[in-house]
Structure formats: C-alpha cells, structure tokens
Image (cartoon, coloured by chain):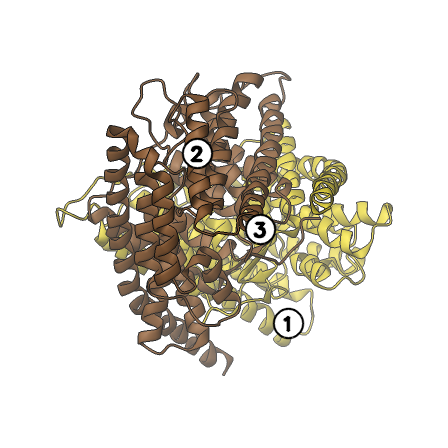
Chain colours: A yellow, B brown
Amino acid sequence: MKRFRDSFEQISIATHLLKWTLYVIPISVTVGSLVALFLWLLEKVTYLHWQHQWLLFLLPLGGVLIYFLYKYLGKNSDAGNNLIMDEIHQPGGGVPARMAPLVLAATVITHLFGGSAGREGTAVQIGGSIANFFARTLHFSKEDVKMLLMTGIAAGFGAVFGTPITGAIFALEVLAVGRIKHDALMPCFIASLLADITSSAWGIHHTHYHILFSEVEKTYFSFIHFDFVLLIKVIVAGTLFGLVGFTFAEVSHTIKNYSNRWIKTKWLIPVIGGVIIIGFTYLLGTQDYLGLGVTNPRSGGVSIVSCFNEGGATRFSWLWKLLFTAITLGMGFKGGEVTPLFFIGAALGNAIAVVSGAPVDLMAGLGFIAVFAGATNTPIACTIMGAELFGTHNLLYYAVACFTAYYFSGHSGIYHAQRVAVSKV
Amino acid sequence: MKRFRDSFEQISIATHLLKWTLYVIPISVTVGSLVALFLWLLEKVTYLHWQHQWLLFLLPLGGVLIYFLYKYLGKNSDAGNNLIMDEIHQPGGGVPARMAPLVLAATVITHLFGGSAGREGTAVQIGGSIANFFARTLHFSKEDVKMLLMTGIAAGFGAVFGTPITGAIFALEVLAVGRIKHDALMPCFIASLLADITSSAWGIHHTHYHILFSEVEKTYFSFIHFDFVLLIKVIVAGTLFGLVGFTFAEVSHTIKNYSNRWIKTKWLIPVIGGVIIIGFTYLLGTQDYLGLGVTNPRSGGVSIVSCFNEGGATRFSWLWKLLFTAITLGMGFKGGEVTPLFFIGAALGNAIAVVSGAPVDLMAGLGFIAVFAGATNTPIACTIMGAELFGTHNLLYYAVACFTAYYFSGHSGIYHAQRVAVSKV
C-alpha cells in the first residue's frame, strides 16, 4: 500500500513540475525579452552619456521627470522591489503591471543623465510585474501568485546578469534573512534559465570578469598544504565587505528618510540630489562614479573591470561610488543597487589588496560578490555567483568572503521588506 | 540611538563568531585526525582484501563480530546518523562517545571482508560523537549542543570527501527536506574547513575526478547559443537519478525491515547477509561491487573512476551496486551510504550516456552528485559539491541534474530522522 502511494507521489510531483514549467515559459520569455530590451537601451544611453557629457547638467531635470512619471502614473509602483517581496510574504493588492514600463523608463532616464545606479532592481521589478500580470489574467490562487512572483524575481535576476543558478537561489534566499526554502526551487530555476536563454537569444552579451589567480601550494609548514596567511586576509576582507554592505544600506536609508523629512516640496528632492551629484563630480574632477560603472570609456578610469587590475582603483573609489549611489537612489532616481554594490566591492577589494599584498584580481572578485552578499543577506547565492562568474578555482575563498560578509552586515539590508527568519547570533 | 544599537549588533556578532571558532577548533582538529586515521585504515584493509580475496568468505563472521560489538558495547550507537539528526531536532539522551570508535571499527571490519559500504556515515558519526563528547564535558546548553552536533556533521563530511563548503551546506540542508537554515552557517563552515585541513595535514589525499567535457557552442538555431538537446538529456537523466536514489532508500529500508521481521535470531541477520553477498559475487563472477569501489585493482574492472570513461561500466552495474549495498547496510554491516551512491550514480550515468549519446564523463559526474542529492534531499549542497569536485565548466548541468533528482526522489530518503520542512508539491 505504501509503495502504491509512493508511486503516486512521483506522479503528482511530475504533474506539479509540468504545470509550473508551462506557467513559467511565457513569463520568462517575456521577462527575458524585456530585460534584453532594457540592457540594449542601457548600453545606448550609457554611450550617449559618454559622448555628450553635458547631459549630466540635465540630471536634476531628469529627476523631476521621473518624479512626475511616478506621481501621475505610478500608483504604488514606487515601492519597487520591496512591494514584490511584501506581496510574496503577505499577498495584498498585487504588483501593478505598469511597474515594468515605468521602472524601465525611469532607469534609462537615470542612466542617460549620469545617475549612479544599477540594473537588477529594474530587472526584478520587470519580472515581478510581468509575473503578477499573468497571474491576474489567469485568476491564480494566492499561493500560486506567491510562487509566480518568486519566479519573476528569478527570471529578472538570471537574465540581467547571465547567472541562471544564482538567479534561482537568490530569489529563494533574499525573502528572509537566514533561510532558503526549496518550495519554488525548480520553478525559479526554470524561469531564471529560460529568461537568460531568451535574453542571450536577443544577442545580449554579459561582461566577462577574470580572476587569473590560482593558488600555488605554499609550504610554511611542510605538513600543511594551505595558505593560512591568505585565508586570514580573506577573513579580514570579508569582515570589511560586510561592514561596507551594512554602511551602504544604512546611508541609503538615512538619505532617503532625511530628504523626505527635510525637503517638503517633493519634486525638489531629485533636483537637489542631481545638483549634489553634479557638485561631487566637479569636486572630484572625474565622471568615473556616474552611471553603471561596468566599464569606463576613459583609459585609466575606474570601473568594475579596471578594479581587477593593479592600479585600477584609488584607495577611496569604493567610498565615492557608495556616496554617489546612495544619493542617486535615495533621492528619487531609479535603478538597481547591485551593480553599484559590485563596483563598491571590487574597488574596496582592490584597495585591500594594495594594502595587504593579496592578489588584486582575487580580492576584487571577492569584494564584487561579498559586499552584495552582505547588503542583501544572500551568502549562498553569492558564493554560487562567484562560481558562475569567475569559475571555481577559488571557490573556497568565495564562501569565506560571502559568509563572513553576511555575518558582519547585521540584520538590516537594502530591502526593508526582507524579514528576519533566523538570527545571526 | 538606532545607530548606537546597530554598532553593538556587529560586536555581538563578532563575539558570537569568536566563541564558536574557539569551540569548533578542538572538535574539528579531533574529527579531522580521526577521519584521517579512518581513511588510512580503510585504504589498508581495502588493499588487504584485494590481495587476499578469500577474506570474502569470512564476511558472515565479520558480521557476527559487528553484531556482538554493538550488542554488548553499543548502547544506542546502532541508530547512527539518525540518532545524531534526532538529537539535533529534539535533544534527548545525547550521542554516546563510544559511537566514534565503534563505527570506525565496524566499518573497517565491513571493508576488510568485502562488504559494499561507504565512508560518510562513519565520518559523520565520528563527528557527531566527538562534538557531543565536548559538549557534555563542558556542560553546554541544549541550544549549543544542537549547534555543536551540526558542526560535527559538517566536520566529518568535509574531511572525508575533501569538500569543505559542501560539508557545511550539507549539514544545514540534510536536517529537513526543503530547507536550509543559516543559523549554524559559519560554525559549520569553520568546522568543515578545519577538519579538511587537518586530515590533509595528516597526508590524506582525495581521489580526483575529471570531466573533460566542455560545451562547444552548438548552432541548431543561429540565434540560440545553447544546446537544448543536451539539456533535455540531462533533465531525463536527472529524473532517473532521482528515481534510483528513491529506489535505493526504499530497497535498503525494506531489506532492513523484513530481515528484522523474518530472522528471529538477530546474529543470523549479518551471517545470512554475508552469505548472500558471497553468493551474488560468485553468481556475477566479479568482485567489482564489493568494498568502497572508488578504484578497482583489476584492469577493466568497474569502479567510480572507471565510470567516467567509455566502457567503464556495464548497463546494469548501477543495479548490482545498489543491491550489494542495500544488502550490506540493511543486514547489519556498517559504513556510509554516500560512496556507494556515488558509484550507483556514476555507473547509471555511464549507462545513460551510452544509450543517449551524451558525453560519458559529464553524465557519470552528474549521476555521482545527483543520485546522492535525491537520496539525501540535498540539491544545493550537491550542486556545490559538483563545483568542488569537478570544476564549474558544467555548473548549469550540475544544478539541473541535482534539482531534478531532488524532486523525483519523493519525500522519503535514506535518513528516516530527516523531517519534511517544505513539501515538494
């Protein structure tokens, strides 16, 4: 009898998977295509900004435009990623379909005029909004809507960075601090993978990062084939990555709260934010901290890619990128936090490598994934991201850096809708 | 004020980590050393058995010896891994210190006489038993004992396979189906890493497996740079890996239950088990399915390593290894299930590759990790294990195979103490 029931169990699992595969296909193809469009537009406006640097002076105006876009068309879209996470925890009014076009337009505007922002927030919001649209059209149950929203997050994340496994695990891990639940494991993975395949099919290529460092067996003690000194450097670096992830989240929240409290005329917030960005740019005499920052048109300029090389970042590049991004996103512009977090981490890793004598490319790569792991409380997803982006030669150090950063970023993170499932102490 | 409290938070996290690092150091060094001793002994008795194949005829006698060892000295040690998991879920009488030497001796006896068994169960029991011994000696609280037992599992697993990250994630993922809780993330990782470093320092080397397959961009459709045909083969294979993981768990439990019900004189169970193993060996005319099976002294013989090459396994090698192991472990002999699961998976992968025309080394590697993922319900740990053992070239396929196998293995697994946290449907 038990055996009989068991064989039914496999059949109901197969049915479940088949059902979700069918649900997820239209969503992930749509999300993958929209993310491809978004990345293509982003590349165009980034080049445009590089060619016409005076566009920076229109940043305050761009901010006003975004403000009124959201005020008159946005409904509750402004809550962004947090709205999607809230809807997963506690289904309410749903994620509006308009969120997708709005956040896409607003992010493109932000980047055109040189705001310092990322991509993943936008992609995730596109994912959540499209998933919710499908769910509403087909009258899904609340439980199924939750699952679909998770697949939307996974699809957006997987497509925007070209990391399908990370996309799936991220969607499961980001919802609550300290827990991965496998309930949506396969649907999220299918969504993330199909969205990535779709955006690749549209001709999207992702930047390749290289860590050439590969451990040589050191022999401090003849019987220990392990570089303890490097391990300790990575632990210290991981602590700093966590603290900087924490700082980024705190500074962003603080800027957002105080600018909302102090500046009563709301459309003035992005104007003032834009002016501050322009001021900092001229104070520093460089445009390096504007925009996405993955590459830099100026030879010798700081970018994520340059951070992997010696001399590719100054000692405080990470701090400047942190401030530029916190001001941009905290004062009404749109975009993700993750690519700037990659920049902050890679630049900090570069600086740590210079001070500590550790390999620059390794430390930049560790900062890239670990500051993000700390700020979003997703240590396992980020360890896997290290493997997806950089290969496994240094997998052990990815885990050490991400796990340490996770602990030292504390319980708050960049998403206030993230709940605490398991305390870190 | 909030900022002030937050800065205390980081300090209490640092104190927490420091405390656990200090707790974990003696445990992981002890566990790493005992595992090194165990692996060294295992190698010796495996060679001894290869040189003196008549030792197989003493297998029934070895079984009686193990039976009386556990009967007169074992207390509740016989429950093995399940006892450790039960103590983590619901602290009770604790894990007896005698479990470590007993399981070590019993596993060595099993392998000396040619029983088909593995290593991880033994290593995990050594870990849990040592951790519990420390906890009792130092009068730890119940909460801390739970954490320590988890670090014991991680230390044993990480040391026995040389996979420190997998060891940590496995300890968190195996406790309940469908969930990873990060509460012991760092303590488990430190334990796993230090135990691995310790056993390496004792001169233990782990077998290296190689997947040379690396995807070439196929162009079925000029705009999709992705091999859909291989993906579908991997999904089908993953389903079979999951079903075979399920079958292994079911057959083992059934053999154990029925032999206990039908054979009233308990010491006769291993005698009969040993005789059946001898019978099957002569029926098949090969000793390939005895012992650990990582390598094979006979040129052309089947082993885990041979499965990575074309012609390295017959079409039903996986089935024979499954039966040999289920009989060995279900009828009173000792050892782990995991290395045989690697064998079963790699052999099945080899057979699937031959039938489907997929790359043999890739399929063998996928079976290696995915049957294990299915039978123990640990898809994320096993995906990471793929990266730790084989490198990341094919990371995507590791995830596809392990996640699919996880779903199709159903809710039961080889550990009956594992709870179901999140249903698969």
**Dot 3: element:** helix
Q: Which residue is mark 3?
A: B261
C-alpha gap between disc 3 and disc 2: 20 Å
Q: Is residue A262 left or right of residue B102?
A: right
Amino acid at circle 1: Asn
Q: Nearer the viewer, residue B78 or B220?
A: B78
Q: Residues within 10 Å of mark 1 (few under 14, many from 20)?
A: some
**Disc on res. B277:** 2
Amino acid at circle 3: Arg
Q: Nearer the viewer, residue A253 or A95?
A: A95
* Chain designation of label 1: A
**Dot 1: element:** helix
Task: Find residue B24 and report its image quarter.
Answer: bottom left
Q: Nearer the viewer, mark 3 or mark 2?
A: 3
Q: Position of residue A106 (x, y in %)?
A: 67, 50
C-alpha gap between disc 3 and disc 1: 73 Å
Q: Position of residue A82 (x, y in %)?
A: 66, 61
Q: Are marks 1 and 2 in contact (CB under 8 Å)?
A: no
Kindly indicate whether the residues beneath marks 1 and 2 are on one polypeptide chain.
Answer: no
* Chain designation of label 2: B
Amino acid at circle 2: Ile
Which of the two discs, 3 and 2, labels the residue nearer the N terminus? 3
Q: Nearer the viewer, residue B399 or B93?
A: B93
Q: Is residue A344 left or right of residue A221?
A: right
C-alpha gap between disc 1 and disc 2: 76 Å
In the rendered image, the vertical position of residue B40 relative to residue A36, given as above or below:
below
**Dot 2: element:** helix
Q: Nearer the viewer, residue A388 or B73?
A: B73
In the rendered image, the vertical position of residue B84 relative to residue A16, given as above or below:
below
Q: Position of residue A210 (x, y in %)?
A: 38, 36
Q: Nearer the viewer, mark 1 or mark 2?
A: 2
